[in-house]
Image (cartoon, rainbow, N blue to C red):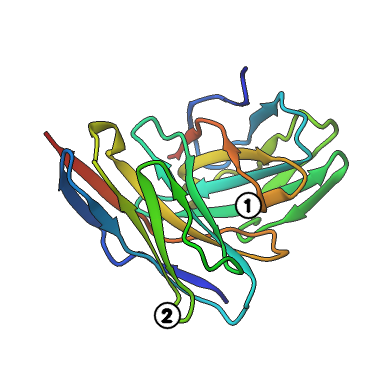
Amino acid sequence: NAGVTQTPKFRILKIGQSMTLQCTQDMNHNYMYWYRQDPGMGLKLIYYSVGAGITDKGEVPNGYNVSRSTTEDFPLRLELAAPSQTSVYFCASSQDRGLREKLFFGSGTQLSVL
Amino acid sequence: AQTVTQSQPEMSVQEAETVTLSCTYDTSESDYYLFWYKQPPSRQMILVIRQEAYKQQNATENRFSVNFQKAAKSFSLKISDSQLGDAAMYFCAYLEEYGNKLVFGAGTILRVKS
């Protein structure tokens, strides 16, 4: 039972480079989320999706883009990486009641922008 | 805007003893959800316990229980019979009744001594 799978686990980017963080879940969850966790801080919501083809901004969406073409996949795109985007990124999913239900998290991607 | 405050950056407990982690929050809503999440060194985020604000009874999950004081806007986590595996960062989080954004506190590092 894989749950929520994120790749890669670690990545170093140069300023101005772009990359896509992959997230896939095998639980047929409609709700999916991207969070970032800065050192010594709690998680902040970047983007979320309530189903295939539907996405919306969270608390800190600037510098990121998402798409949701299938129920399983919810990739996060970083365009023109900046040092402020150095963080640990978590993908999560939940069943139909969204955040009111248990969130299943991936193991995170540690990103450094130098 | 809702805020969540965890006033204890770090706590220590002896194995088999009991420890209480504090959390306060600020909201003008009457219906909402509160959560405690555990993040061990593996970075995986794990739901520990959930409380619905309309329920007066405090939630309990095995060795974990909460003291929910709605009027005081307080939501503390009690861990009984502490185990080495309880060592982790613990996050308190708030969610509006129909909200799409979990608001996290800054976290409390729990160390368990053998």
Q: Which mark is residue A46?
A: 1
How many angstroms separate mark 1 from mark 2 (CA)? 30 Å
Q: Residue at x 62, y 61 (%)?
A: A59
Q: Are labels 1 and 2 assigned to the same chain?
A: no
The residue sitting at the top extreme is: A1
Disc 1, SS: strand
In-image side of B7 versus A41 (left or right): left
Specify the subunit that label 1 lies on: A
Amino acid type of the residue tagged 1 in the rendering = Ile
Q: Residue at x 47, y 39 (%)?
A: B45
Q: Is residue A49 visible?
A: yes
The residue sitting at the front extreme is: B57
**Residue A26 x %, y %:** 71, 23
Q: Which mark is residue A74?
A: none
Q: Which mark is residue B72?
A: 2
**Residue B73 x %, y %:** 45, 76
Specify the subunit that label 2 lies on: B
Q: Is residue B26 above or below residue B95?
A: below
Amino acid type of the residue tagged 2 in the rendering = Ala
Quarter of the image with the C terminus of chain A is top left
Q: Is residue A80 above or below residue B71?
A: above
Residue in the foreground of this view, choosing between B13 and B91: B13
The quadrant where residue B75 appears: bottom left
Q: Residues within 10 Å of mark 1 (few under 14, many from 20)?
A: many
Q: Residue at x 64, y 59 (%)?
A: B101
